[in-house]
Image (cartoon, rainbow, N blue to C red):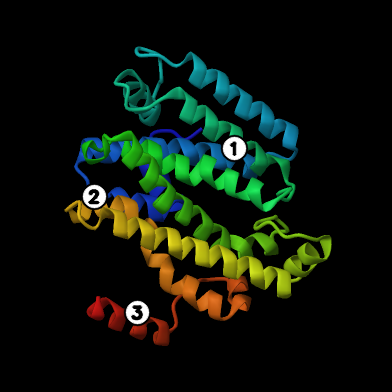
Amino acid sequence: MIGANWLSNLKKFDRERFDSIRHLDSERRKGIAAIYSFNLELANIAWNVSEPELGYLKLRWWEDYINDMHDGYSFGENEYLLILSKLLAEGKLHKSNLLRLIKAREFDCSKKPFDSYEQQIKYIRDTSQNLLFMGLSCLIEFNDYSLRRNLSKYFGLSLGLARFVLAAGSLSQNKCYSLFLPTGIDYSTYFEGRINENISQRIHSDIDLTLNLFHAGKKEIKSMGLKKNILSVLYTVNNFVPILLEIKNNPQFIYRKDHKLSFRAKFFGKINELVE
């Protein structure tokens, strides 16, 4: 279980989300960080069990823990759990969203591929999109439920899609499934670090959807006059955009060990910033 160093762990293992909230005031930053740290706790389960059943048992424990959580509950040294409890008591957070996150993490423990593309999208909605929805509930700027729901779709779903693409290479090296692929031959090709037409199409499709969602979200909030520290909570995927474009042009790049931009991509990215 993540203990007293929960903020350091979030910074180390989920740097993009940590950076997205670091310019907020302390109270709001810790509120969102607690939600993200709970997600990190759940995500780590699959990597620390030898059998799927052991992972399911740990997730059931967390399910019972959240169901029983109430104000005044004993949390020991786990500050982030105390913060979650306060958010629940204040009505900013709802148990149903936390339980939805726990349920989604069963897929991680299963060690199996997605049955369909729809299942992959549902998984991202229940994790990345759901996480941002909960995070935005800590910010008064997003008190409106419909706005929060729409923005979490644009920016949370796009982040989840981007991460699937960017993690595909390292996951394949560890013989872990990532993107949904239609045939067993596709997965064999994927684990061999090669590209075929189905893999290339899936990468192109997911990157296109990521970029479309991100740009649609930017249009929706253009007239809201949000401050930069608030925008950073939404714009987590922004730094991935140039890398995604590189991968779209050359899908073989998904197998790179370290996704760093080429000088050419950095140069044209800076030009685009100046034009915008």
- Going by the numbered disc 2, the residue's amino acid type is Ile
- Going by the numbered disc 3, the residue's amino acid type is Gly
- Residue at the (77%, 70%) spot, across then down: 189
Q: Residue 147's x, y, as percent? A: 32, 42
Residue 230's mark?
Answer: 2
Helix, strand or loop under label 2: helix
- Residue at the (69%, 59%) spot, across then down: 174
Determine the CA span between mark 1 and mark 2: 27 Å
Q: How many marks?
A: 3
Residue beneath disc 1: 104
Question: As displayed, is residue 245 above or below residue 18?
Answer: below
Determine the CA span between mark 2 and mark 3: 23 Å
Residue beneath disc 3: 269
Q: Counting residues from the N terminus, which is met first, the one under dot 3 or under dot 1? A: 1
Q: Is residue 264 visible?
A: yes
Q: Residue 96's x, y, as percent? A: 48, 25
